[in-house]
């Protein structure tokens, strides 16, 4: 059935795109341009087909990140986004209902489309964690008033949520503790049930005063609110949290306890620090590009004067010294040129190119890094590689990111090997180091935005995520093989451009 759905989507791709775009223009005309709307529709349909073909919804993640950035900038809310996908569903249905290539009931086919759209929309909603919290706060009173009717539903939330959800009875004892709480605080349900509500408080007077205020507000039926505070984990670590408290009423509306939702805010604080660092690095990059440009002009003048002196000089010793000066000026000029090229905003237009030139340029840039003094670079680049469709600036960014990560892995002392070859269908580039390596848990997260193993201030966690998105836009793949204390191999594969 999936094969049939794929064939139908591909067969009517252009018509569905036109129809869906026309439906969205009146909805989004005040927030997005017609070109942006059409690009969203084309990317969405392309993602639908890709997910159907691969069966892996992770293939939609980069698309969702791009869409999130676009929609957030345009202040498009979740309800509007849901309408966009609904319009797409109707556009697809219009064409598959009248298609004669299959006797299959269109409703059955639509079921597959609906399931796909629901899954992708659900993954998009995950990017709106704060929005979900707001919705949860608005619904809390309604859920509390129907506690008995929704007991099983609430139990499912209690067990499966990644956030800490717990309940305190009228005697100030824990009576419920979910897996999210166990994950955040380290205590199992057996260890925590029956313990006093103050069990997680750091040993300071202000936290006990805070608890007394929470109890008074809950009994007094004051509206629930989010509290920024700290709590203590099983290992003694104090973490920053956001706490939302709501009254648990009896059938008569009397206070019988309270529900508590705790969100670990420490990761958010780290994330904010990483974003701040990323912005600082962006500014530094712009300054570096400007400085490099300003250096270029006096260098050109100095180089010209040296050449004039070389032509007029007759002394062999001075001639040798001038040659050394000229050689070093040329070296500085090359460094400046490569810095300017690398700092220039990347081009998103692809062209048919030889990947070898990009590899050599990336190696040339990285070799000027101060960490390479004890690093040995080994290359095995295949001559006359088949041509590929790429944006050279973007692919250069990918290679530089991976090479710099390799430098960090070997801590400035080791071997980095770069190899290129083709298998008839793809051009492959392997970048290998003999550094610290990674475990499987780290490997599973390295392409996630803002994930980094480096200390705050030393890495933004964006390099590999951006690199992954770039390679996916080229219809390629990045694979990583790594073992602790043995090193890592990043393999980039890009389809060969067929004649």
Image (cartoon, rainbow, N blue to C red):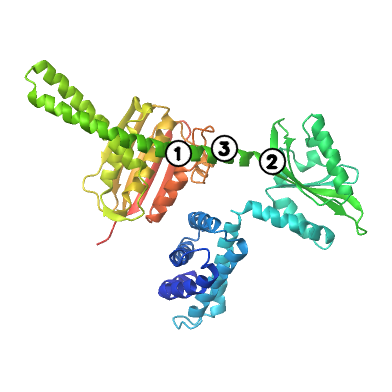
Question: Where's residue 350, x and y in %?
Answer: 32, 55
Question: Where's residue 141, x and y in %?
Answer: 80, 58
Placement of 83 over or under 173, stated as above or below: below
Question: Could you classify mark 2 by the number of other residues whose Cα lies within 10 Å: few (under 14), some (14-19), or many (20 or more)?
Answer: some
Q: Confirm whether residue 196 shows in the render.
A: no
Relative to 450, is 240 on the left or the right? Answer: right
Question: In terms of depth relative to the viewer, which is nearer, 172 or 460?
Answer: 460
The residue drawn where x is 26% and y is 34% is: 297
The residue drawn where x is 79% and y is 41% is: 190
Question: Where's residue 311, x and y in %?
Answer: 8, 26
Label for residue 283? 1
Placement of 34 over or under 474, stated as above or below: below
> Which picture quadrant has residue 156?
bottom right
The residue drawn where x is 43% and y is 27% is: 411
Secondary element at tag 2: helix
> Which picture quadrant has residue 367?
top left
Pointer 2 or 1: first along the chain: 2
Secondary element at tag 1: helix
Question: Which residue in the structure is indicated by mark 3?
Answer: 273
Q: CA distance from mark 2 to mark 3?
A: 21 Å
Question: Which residue in the structure is indicated by mark 2?
Answer: 184
Question: Could you classify mark 3 by the number of other residues whose Cα lies within 10 Å: few (under 14), some (14-19), or many (20 or more)?
Answer: some
């Amino acid at each position: 059935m999936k094969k049939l759905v794929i064939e139908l989507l591909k067969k009517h791709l252009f018509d569905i795109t036109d129809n869906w775009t026309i439906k969205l223009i009146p909805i989004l005309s005040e927030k997005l341009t017609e070109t942006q709307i059409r690009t969203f529709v084309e990317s969405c349909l392309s993602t639908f087909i890709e997910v159907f073909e691969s069966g892996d919804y992770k293939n939609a993640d980069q698309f969702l990140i791009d869409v999130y950035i676009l929609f957030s900038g345009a202040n498009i809310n979740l309800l509007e986004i849901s309408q966009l996908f609904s319009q797409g569903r109707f556009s697809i249905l219009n064409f598959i209902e009248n298609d004669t290539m299959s006797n299959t009931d269109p409703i059955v086919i639509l079921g597959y489309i609906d399931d796909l759209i629901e899954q992708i929309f659900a993954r998009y909603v995950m990017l709106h964690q704060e929005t979900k919290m707001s919705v949860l706060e608005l619904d809390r009173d309604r859920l509390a008033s129907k506690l008995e009717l929704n007991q099983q539903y609430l139990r499912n939330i209690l067990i499966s949520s990644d956030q800490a959800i717990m309940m305190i009875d009228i005697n100030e004892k824990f009576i419920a503790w979910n897996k999210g709480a166990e994950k955040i605080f380290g205590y199992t349900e057996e260890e925590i049930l029956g313990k006093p509500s103050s069990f997680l408080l750091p040993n300071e007077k202000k936290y006990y005063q805070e608890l007394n205020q929470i109890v008074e507000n809950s009994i007094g039926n004051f509206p629930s609110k989010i509290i920024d505070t700290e709590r203590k984990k099983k290992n003694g670590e104090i973490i920053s949290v956001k706490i939302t408290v709501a009254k648990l009423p009896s059938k008569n509306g009397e206070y019988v306890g309270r529900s508590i939702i705790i969100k670990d805010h420490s990761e958010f604080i780290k994330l904010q620090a990483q974003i701040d660092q990323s912005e600082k690095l962006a500014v530094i990059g712009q300054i570096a590009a400007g400085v490099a440009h300003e250096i270029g002009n006096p260098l050109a003048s100095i180089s010209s004067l040296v050449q004039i002196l070389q032509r007029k000089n007759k002394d062999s010793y001075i001639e040798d010294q001038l040659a050394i000066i000229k050689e070093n000026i040329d070296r500085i000029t090359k460094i400046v040129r490569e810095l300017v090229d690398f700092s220039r905003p990347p081009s998103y237009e692809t062209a048919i190119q030889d990947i070898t030139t990009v590899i050599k340029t990336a190696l040339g840039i990285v070799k000027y890094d101060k960490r390479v003094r004890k690093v040995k670079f080994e290359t095995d680049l295949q001559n006359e590689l088949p041509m590929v469709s790429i944006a050279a600036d973007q692919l250069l960014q990918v290679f530089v990111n991976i090479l710099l990560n390799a430098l960090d892995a070997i801590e400035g002392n080791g071997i980095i090997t770069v190899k290129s070859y083709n298998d008839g269908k793809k051009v492959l580039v392997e970048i290998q180091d003999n550094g610290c390596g990674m475990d499987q848990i780290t490997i599973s997260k390295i392409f996630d935005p803002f994930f980094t193993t480096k200390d705050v201030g030393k890495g933004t966690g964006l390099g590999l995520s951006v690199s992954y998105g770039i390679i996916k836009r080229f219809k390629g793949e990045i694979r990583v093989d790594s073992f602790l204390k043995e090193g890592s191999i990043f393999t980039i594969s890009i389809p060969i451009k067929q004649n």
